Amino acid sequence: MRTHLFLTALAATSIFVAACGDSTGPTTPTTVTDLAATPVGTNKIELTWTGTSGEGYKLERATGAATAFALIATVDALAADGMQTYTDSGLVVDQDYSYRITSVVGNLQSTPSASVTTTACAACVNITGDITSSRTLFADTVYKLVGFIHVANGATLTIQPGTKIRGDYNTLGSSLFILRGAKIDAQGTADKPIVFTSSRLPGERQPGDWGGLLIVGNAINNRSGSVIVEGTGTDGSAVVSGKNYDVVYNGGTTATDNSGTLKYVRVEFAGFAPVVDNEFNGFTFAAVGSGTRMSYLQTLAPLDDSYEFFGGGFDIDHIVAFETADDMFDMSEGWVGRMQFLIGINTVQLTPRTGAGFYATDMEGLENDGCNGSGCDNGYDTQPFSIPLVANFTLIGCGKAQCVGPSGGHGMMIRRGMGGYYVNGVVARFPTDGISLRDQSTYDRAGATPTPSATADLQMLNIYFSQVNNLLFQAPSASQFALDPTANSLTLAPAADSASTLFVKIPQVGATPTDVNDFDFTPANGAAIATGGLTTFAGAIATKAGSFASGTSYRGAVDPAGPKWWQGWTYYARN
């Protein structure tokens, strides 16, 4: 009897041990591998993935390419395998969102899925071909330029305030051209600027991600022959929609030509080079006529110039250039426009997109030329001369020689027969010198005398220079000239008057600004630039300025007692 009971107990124990030994416990949930995110409707993104029976899910979201994910929803355990959906709503139009999903069974969780990122928009539209009839781009839609897009055939491209247009990073050279006879009507507002930017996510963007905005008019340029926009023609001369065909800009005859209106427009991370050393710019204006009007424009991190003007002439005011890879403002080939309130600042050399081009070796604040190269039938003296008005400008360099290249670092490069009226400016942190006034033809525009003449085609008046290697002008030589500082009110600041003391707030040399709030270009209280301006224009300057521009008691782009006009619509980031 005792033996029987013992065997029975032993058998039961053996069964229990065997059962425990064969068990592996609950199975780890399956990691989702096919999560997708698709914009649907207005302010909504639909998530889809393949679900597994018996598993629930945690859905998480981050803004942009951030890694700080937050829980937005949970899904109960599924009754059966199959495709699952979840709609995330109430999102911000034009904002990028990242998502990931984690599978859950009881207290066990899978590793999170790979994140997916998309943009919240009522619709996301690719523009893949030329625009040959009038079209409107709407603020509730995110547009992507895929290829070289030309507005042609007399069409007008209208862009609503707040619209975002992205240059396709995956299509080398994606860009927007407004050709002769066509127009652009892009009038944003301070709270709803129109933004052209890279298709890459914040944190990944680089100079040269896409091509930029190019406007071609029918005004006068001083080069003869057939001159095409730099970088065009890599796909030949035949007009093929969406391809990079030749775009000719010289030979125009209508000084009053109208290419449209730009207002509160930003161009970011542009400047791709279709041809080596022929990068596009942030904004390119080729033979654009005086019927055109532009105000409140900004560039950020272009891989060539921020603004380049080839001939023509129109009124432009309140323009900003952040982190330019070449010249902040470049004018040539008979440019006769009028400009007032310009801000340019560089703090660093960013890393360009691979294969997009290179930083310049001669970066300047202004690089202004008359005529040079083919089609300049009378050399530097080819007419019409380049004689712009540039009033109230603030140009701040990075302060380091390695930022500007071995041939750069001049605050103002005026050469090759260039004229113009440069008044009420501030030039700071250019490590070579304040002004390089080159060649006899250029000096002749000033009357071939260091003292000012009210009738001269080249006048530089009431400009303040700080941290320019203690050289107001590049050392005079057979090819370098200088003007009389006192007679022209050109002031070289004392060493104690560094650039950082002149303004309410600008980053120190070598600092890393993080957003636009790190900049305040208002003259500091008591700063020398808060006064000393040319208050009354006279002679040729007054004639040129007309009713467009007037003198100021201050120097630089911002009135110490006026509005901070760049705030609210400009943007700063390094990537």
Image (cartoon, grey):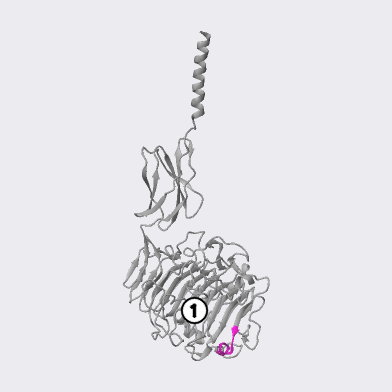
Looking at this view, name the residue that lies furthest to the right: 495
Near mark 1 (Cα within 10 A), the count class, few <14, some 14-19 or many ≥20, is some
Count of numbered labels shown in the rendering = 1
The boundaries of the magenta stretch are: 437-444
Q: Left or right: 292 with respect to 352?
A: left
Looking at this view, name the residue that lies furthest to the left: 133
Residue 256, position in %: x, y?
39, 83
Residue type indicated by callout 1: Ser
Residue 419, position in %: x, y?
53, 85
- Front-most of 459 and 535? 459
Q: Which residue is mark 1?
A: 550
Residue 352, position in %: x, y?
54, 67
Q: Choose top left, top right, bottom left or bottom right for residue 560.
A: bottom right
- Front-most of 139 and 165? 165
Residue 27, position in %: x, y?
47, 36
- Evaluate whether residue 551 shows in this view: no
Q: What SS does tag 1 mark?
A: loop
- Front-most of 152 and 528? 152
472 is higher (above) or lower (below) than 500 = below
